[in-house]
Amino acid sequence: MSETHNSDALMTAEDIEAFDDIEYDDIPVPEWGGRKVRIRGLSGEDWAHLTGAALVATGRDVSIRVNIIAEQKIRVVAACLVGPDMEPLFTRDKIRVLGKKSAAAIERLYDKAQELSGQGEDAVEAAEGNSGAGPTGSTS
C-alpha cells in the first residue's frame, strides 16, 4: 500500500496527534503605537482550563461574574501572546502588568484569540451552519 495521503482517508489518532493545528497571526495594536504582536490560538485543553475556571467561580452574583469575565479575558490574552519562538510573553506573575494596559487593546486581542481558537459567536454560527441535521455516515 502506498504512503500517499488521501484526503478521503480517515485519520488515525497518531495522524491527529502529529498534526500542527494551532493557528497564529501577527497583528498591529493601534493602542501600542501600531506595533505588531503575535497571537496564537489555544488548544482545546488550554481554552477549557482558562475559561472553565471562570465559569466555576461565577456563582450567582452578577458583580463577581463581570469581574471574573474581565480577568478571564486578560488571562486568555496573556496565554495567547507569544514571541517569535512561540513561547508566551507573559508568565503568571506578569499577567497583572497586562491588566493595566488599554482595555481596547485587550478586547481586540481577546477577540483575535477567540477567532484563532475557534471560539466566540462567529465560531458558533459557523459550526451550526456546518453541522447539518446530524451524522451522515452510512448505516449499512
Image (cartoon, grey):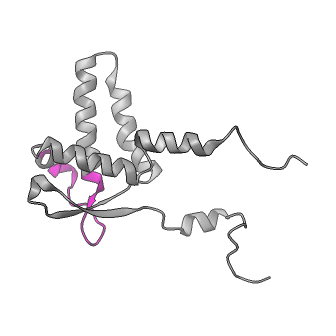
Query: Going 48% across and 67% down the picture, which residue do you hit?
Result: 20
Image position of 61 with respect to 57: above or below: above
Image position of 111 with respect to 19: above or below: above
| Residue located farthest toward the top when viewing the structure as drawn | 60
Q: Position of residue 124 (x, y in %)?
A: 49, 40
Q: Position of residue 85 (x, y in %)?
A: 28, 72
Q: Which quadrant of the view contains residue 17?
A: bottom right
Query: Going 57% across and 42% down the picture, which residue do you hit?
Result: 129
Q: The N terminus appears in which quarter of the rendering?
A: bottom right
Q: Is residue 25 left or right of residue 2?
A: left
Image position of 68 with respect to 108: above or below: above
Query: Going 39% across and 43% down the picture, which residue do you hit?
Result: 49
| Residue located farthest toward the bottom when viewing the structure as drawn | 2
Q: Write down the region rendered in magenta.
A: 78-96
| Residue located farthest toward the front when viewing the structure as drawn | 129
Q: Is residue 128 left or right of residue 21?
A: right
Q: Nearer the viewer, residue 16 or 6?
A: 6
Residue 83 colored in magenta in the image: yes
Query: Going 28% across and 32% down the picture, which residue do you hit?
Result: 69
Q: Is residue 94 left or right of residue 118?
A: left
Q: Position of residue 39 (x, y in %)?
A: 29, 59
